[in-house]
Image: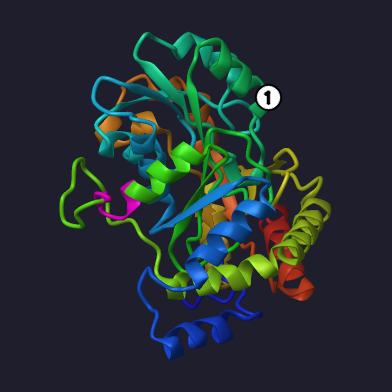
Amino acid sequence: MTVKYPVAKPSLAGNELAYVSDAINEGWISSHGAYVPRLEQDFAAYNGMRHGVACASGTAALALALRALGIGPGDEVLVPEFTMIACAWAVTHVGATPVFVDCGADLNIDVSAVEDKITASTKVIMPVHIYGRQCDMDEIMRIAFDYNLRVVEDSAEAHGIRPVADIACFSFDATKIMTAGEGGICLTDDPRLAGQLAHLHSWAYSRDLRFLHKKLGFNFRMTNMQAAVALAQLERLDEMLRQRAEIERRYDEGLAGTPGLTLMPPRDVLWTYDLRASRMPQLREFLAEDGIETRPFFQPMSRQPPYFDQEWPALNAARFATDGLLLPTYVGMAVSEQEHIIGRIREFYRAG
């Protein structure tokens, strides 16, 4: 089956090629080069934060953030049930224990359930802005203050939402709102945390002897070529967000009132268009025959083999995972392409 309408693809219509060519021509293709600090400074400024530390991926950014906060064995981190497994993996990779909190109707972490999960071992809350919907950060930050916890904000799907946490982590994966192919970044207002992030992500070299390492570090650096792509994407981010908002509007209007579909709450920024669909597997097969790629929702963390909990079927996250579907969402999608996708979905339900 040929994919005519991918669920996601990058838009590389700006200075991406020029900046990468410049990095290659200058010979700076590793983590050293002018584009890395430029991206760190400019992306932090765009998000109203003081410091940025670019790294190898969004997953790496989460693990790096937790290590910079001193999280390790014996500690617990509150993680959403409904999210990409990378969030839980980051906790496990630093030796801590993920404790899962179910989602609400907007798919985000249910803030009303957070306090019941807090124990003496809890150190961090990790909210995730699912599919571009902002979590209730005011309430999360209040809870964190009351219990003296830190907050690591997973903004992998939420470029354009201004972060407020101790550390905010973004992904630049090829499917994300802005991309470097791979890559990620940590943002913080705390200069000491920024220094620790930068120290840990580059082998934790000592200041006085280059090959003496006093603690476990990572090789989580971003290359100058990746940073060149990301910087070009950042220059176009506002326009890409506007185009994505138009995609959301057209899907909302075109699919409203379709029997068998449940539209989801509005998004603060559109990463990917999500909805709930009766007979979801059959709809996916029907669309795939026409080259329309789709993806199901995330599965609950408690269903994942490394974190399996036999109570998972009772979760809200499990209910949403049963019929949730992601539709093609990418900058550059023609109106006619989107109208075709909408028409095929409506045709499926008209046929019964």
Q: Residue at x 34, y 14 (%)?
A: 121
Q: Quadrant of residue 86?
A: top left
Residue, x 80% and y 60% (percent of image)? 246
Q: Secondary structure at mark 1?
A: helix
Which residue is labeled 1 in the image? Answer: 138
Residue 83: % across, % down:
48, 39
Q: Which residues are magenta?
A: 200-207
Residue 319, compared with residue 216, is above or below; it is: above
Quick check: 143 above or below 285?
A: above
Question: Where is residue 226 drawn, in percent x and y?
Answer: 46, 71
Looking at the picture, how far across and down is residue 142, in whole percent?
62, 17
In the image: residue 180, left or right of residue 267? left
Q: Is residue 45 left or right of residue 16?
A: right
Q: Main secondary structure of the magenta part?
A: loop
* Residue found at the far left of this picture: 212
| Color encoding of the figure | rainbow
- Is 21 in front, or is 33? 33
Vertical position of residue 279 compared to residue 320: above or below: below
For mark 1, does the 10 Å Cα neighbourhood hold few (<14), some (14 to 19), or many (20 or more) residues?
Answer: few
Q: Is residue 58 visible?
A: yes
Q: Magenta span has 52?
A: no
> Residue lying farthest right?
253
Looking at the rendering, which quadrant does residue 31 occupy? Answer: bottom left
- Residue sticking out furthest to the bottom: 25
The number of numbered badges drawn on the structure is 1
Q: Is residue 87 left or right of residue 188?
A: left
The residue sitting at 76% across, 48% down in the picture is 258
Quadrant assignment, res 78 = top left
Q: Can you give x and y, in whole percent of width and height, for residue 196 in the image?
A: 38, 42
Q: In the rendered image of this protein, does residue 67 appear above or below residue 240? A: above
Residue 279 can be seen, yes or no: no
